[in-house]
């Protein structure tokens, strides 16, 4: 699954913990602490 904001991504940004693939590498929120329910 890919984030729609990364289609034709020209300027990927640093990953932040927001549920989106900010750096357009196909992974969401990598490096962020996982939530424990």
Image (tube, rainbow, N blue to C red):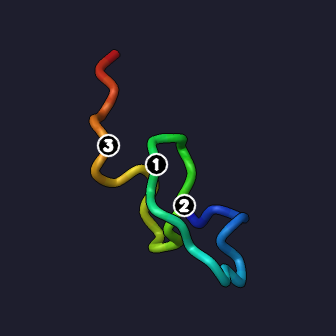
Instruction: Name the element at disc 3.
Output: loop
How far from the left and from the top, in percent, is residue 19? Answer: 53, 43
Residue at mark 1 to residue at mark 3: CA–CA distance: 8 Å
Q: Is residue 33 above or below residue 16?
A: above
Where does the N terminus fall, quadrant-wise?
A: bottom right
Q: Would you call the spot at circle 3 few (<14 residues within 10 Å), some (14-19), or many (20 or more)? A: few
Q: Quadrant of residue 17?
A: top left
Q: Is residue 35 above or below residue 19?
A: above
Evaluate if marks 1 and 3 touch, with contact meaning CB atoms under 8 Å apart: yes
Q: Quadrant of residue 35?
A: top left
Q: Which residue is mark 2?
A: 22
Evaluate if marks 2 and 1 touch, with contact meaning CB atoms under 8 Å apart: yes
Instruction: Name the element at disc 2.
Output: loop
Numbered tag placed on residue 32 in the rendering: 3
| Nearer to us in this view, 35 or 10 | 10
Q: Would you call the spot at circle 2 few (<14 residues within 10 Å), some (14-19), or many (20 or more)? A: many
Residue at mark 3 to residue at mark 2: CA–CA distance: 12 Å
Q: Is residue 26 above or below residue 16?
A: below
Apparent side of residue 15 relative to residue 1 in the rendered image (left or right): left
Number of marks in the image?
3
Image point (53%, 72%), residue name: 24
Tell which circle, 1 or 3, labels the residue nearer the N-terminal end: 1
Q: Which residue is mark 1?
A: 16
């Amino acid at each position: 699954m890919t984030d729609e904001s990364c289609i034709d991504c020209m300027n990927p940004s640093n990953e932040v913990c927001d549920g989106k693939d900010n750096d357009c590498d196909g992974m969401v929120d990598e490096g962020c602490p996982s939530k424990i329910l």
